[in-house]
Image (cartoon, rainbow, N blue to C red):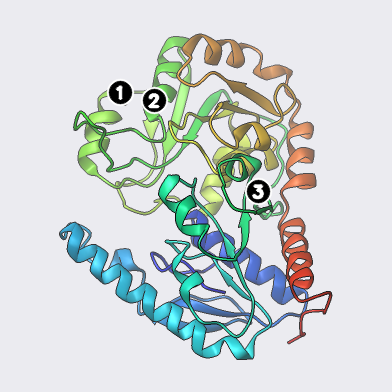
Amino acid sequence: MLAPLERAVNENQTAARPRLVFDLSVELIKQGHQVALVGTADSFVKGAKIIPAINKGFYEVQNMQASPTSLTSSWLCYLTKQAKIAEKLSSQFDICHSHTKPELLPLMAKLECPLVTTLHLMPDTLLNETLSLFKANLVVPSKAVQQKMKTRSLVIYHGIDTNLYSFKREKSDYLFWLGRVSMAKNKQGKFADEKGALWAIKLAKATKSKLIMSGNIESKEAFDQIIKPSLSNKIKWLGCISFEQPLKKQEVVKLYQKAKAVLITSQLEETFCLVAVEAQSCGTPVIAFDKGALKEVVKHSKTGFIVKPNGLPEMKNALKKIDSIKPDDCQQWAKENFSLNKMAENYIQLYQKILGGRSLAPS
């Protein structure tokens, strides 16, 4: 398994890519398969061999305020090292499965076993052109991503631990928003608000609703401009200002479980949406902008509502109808479609197909 190098892979991780690598590795090991993980030295997956390509996550070892040239150079050095480690060890394994970024780099390695690459981002023209140069086993997490691809790919939905994100029927009277406060800026030089925190705030103000917000903050300046001016007795931010998610998983679970609704107000075309799936697993409906894969992840009018992006009237109307959504339907949808076991089984079927029907070697 080629892990993302930005962060460690472990059970406490909250960032999407390393979490998915951890969960998939755990499921494969449960089913008797041998897993080696090429990533950060401080990664830990019980039963997996850790092969370091970097001592700690790139965000820890690197000054993120350094020049773009310096950051790019350092990043490519670590990625090249990771690819070369995979090349050297590839004869010992049946499959090499890459979740690294940029996704294309391991495709250039001379591996002695088949390579599966999971694409975790929405492809643009340049990435599509580059991927078309390789014969690759590409996996994407949604039909929304697949429709943007110029090369052949297979959809395998991400899975979550539905035991961790457990069901609770009784709800409190607050809305919950969980996301990233990005350092990215738009063409006008203003912070882009990629996850749409302002739209969650607008809905809360327009409906006089209580709103709880949390997430990782890439830029304090962005937080001070976008969110801080609106904080009040009714609109609260939980957790410290941190580049990583400040709340523990169990704290987030409790917030999901008791929320009246979870708001997904992303301005980006989402490749999947773990937050939406986690909320539904807890029995909580979702109000989400129609961006990317969200219409695949949320069952409209059954487990939540998909609304026009940046449409405050549509958001308000969805909130009025939120009590029509049954918590049991939300949980059932998540368990049936987005469990860890289902994700792992789909990947194992793909591995076996690539290997010509041969079963993976047990550990």
Which residue corresponds to mark 3?
165
Q: Nearer the viewer, residue 262 or 3?
A: 3
Element marked by disc 2: strand
**Separation of marks 1 and 3 at Cα, in angstroms:** 29 Å
Residue sitting at 65 percent across and 29 percent down? Answer: 285
**Separation of marks 2 and 3 at Cα, in angstroms:** 24 Å
Which residue corresponds to mark 2?
235
Q: Nearer the viewer, residue 170 or 125?
A: 125
The crowding category of the residue bearing disc 3, from other C-alpha atoms within 10 Å (few below 14, some 14 to 19, many at least 20), is: many
Element marked by disc 3: loop
Drawn side of residue 53 relative to residue 251, left or right: left
Element marked by disc 1: helix
> Which picture quadrant has residue 36?
bottom right
Residue 55 seen in the figure: yes
Q: What percent of the width, then of the height, locates residue 182? A: 32, 42
Q: Nearer the viewer, residue 31 or 175?
A: 31
Three-letter amino acid code at the position of disc 3: Tyr
**Separation of marks 1 and 2 at Cα, in angstroms:** 7 Å
Drawn side of residue 299 relative to residue 187, left or right: right
Three-letter amino acid code at the position of disc 1: Ser
Q: Is residue 318 above or below residue 254?
A: above
Work out which residue is located at the far front of the displayed protein and give it: 133
- N-terminal label among 2 and 3: 3
